[in-house]
Amino acid sequence: GVLEIKGKVSPFLELGVGFNMDLTARENVYQNGIILGLSRKQVDERFDKIIEFSELEKFVDTKMKNFSSGMHVRLAFSVAIQVDADILLMDEVLAVGDMHFQQKCFEVFNRYKQEKKTIILVTHDMGSVQRYCTRAIFLSNGKIIKDGNPNKVVEEYTRFAMQ
């Protein structure tokens, strides 16, 4: 098949991708921001917002190797949403964040939705699918099992999982 992308994509696919564990959070914000397409000047302008959203102000000069997985997620997500992407690609990574931070992330998803932007969310959290998705696709072994209304897709997924 063919996939055509119209817009800028901000991928958030795997914990730690784009981060150097021997660098500080500050250094990694710059590195990751540039990898995602921001200029150094843009990272400078957005740096405070990134750190504030991540709630890691006290750890900005701490090396990433001393961060928990939840802290990694906070920082990576905070950088990803500052890229001004049209498409946010999220793969299961919010599963390691705490409930408070997950709620902040879903508020960002709602904002993206209101701005008519696209979020591709890969998850096994059916509650999130029902709450935040306008369309869902259930895949199994690379094949589409069900595509459409999130509630109907969740029903099919649940039936499939119970077999």
Image: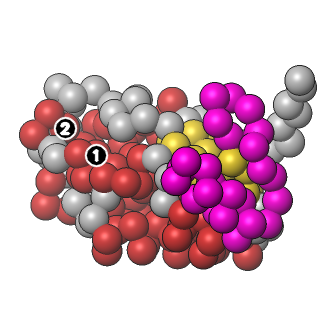
Residue pointed to by mark 1: 72
Residue farthest to the front, as pictured: 163
Q: Position of residue 39 (x, y in %)?
A: 55, 38
Q: Are marks 1 and 2 in contact (CB under 8 Å)?
A: yes
Q: Position of residue 125 (x, y in %)?
A: 49, 60
Amino acid carrying mark 1 in the image:
His
Residue pointed to by mark 2: 64
- When the figure is inspected, residue 68 is found, relative to residue 57, above or below; the finding is above
Residue 14 shown in magenta: no
Left or right of residue 111, residue 68 in this image? left
Residue visible at 74% across and 32% down in the picture? 143
Q: The residue tagged with tag 2: helix, strand or loop?
A: helix
Residue visible at 41% across and 54% down in the picture? 94
Instruction: Name the image quarter holding residue 84.
Output: bottom right
> Distance from label 1 to label 2 (Cα)?
8 Å
Q: Position of residue 156 (x, y in %)?
A: 68, 57
Q: The residue tagged with tag 1: helix, strand or loop?
A: helix
Neighbour tally class for label 1: few under 14, some 14-19, many 20 plus, Cα within 10 Å: many
Do we see residue 106 in this rendering? yes
* 59 and 137: which is toward the camera: 137
Q: Earlier in the sequence, mark 1 or mark 2?
A: 2
- When the figure is inspected, residue 150 is found, relative to residue 10, above or below; the finding is below
Which label sits in the foreground, 1 or 2?
1
Neighbour tally class for label 2: few under 14, some 14-19, many 20 plus, Cα within 10 Å: many
* 131 and 63: which is toward the camera: 131
Left or right of residue 18, residue 88 in this image? right
Amino acid carrying mark 2 in the image:
Met
- For the record, the magenta segment spans 139-163
* 78 and 49: which is toward the camera: 78
Q: Position of residue 134 (x, y in %)?
A: 76, 68
The numbered disc on residue 82 is none
Instruction: Name the image quarter holding residue 144.
Output: top right
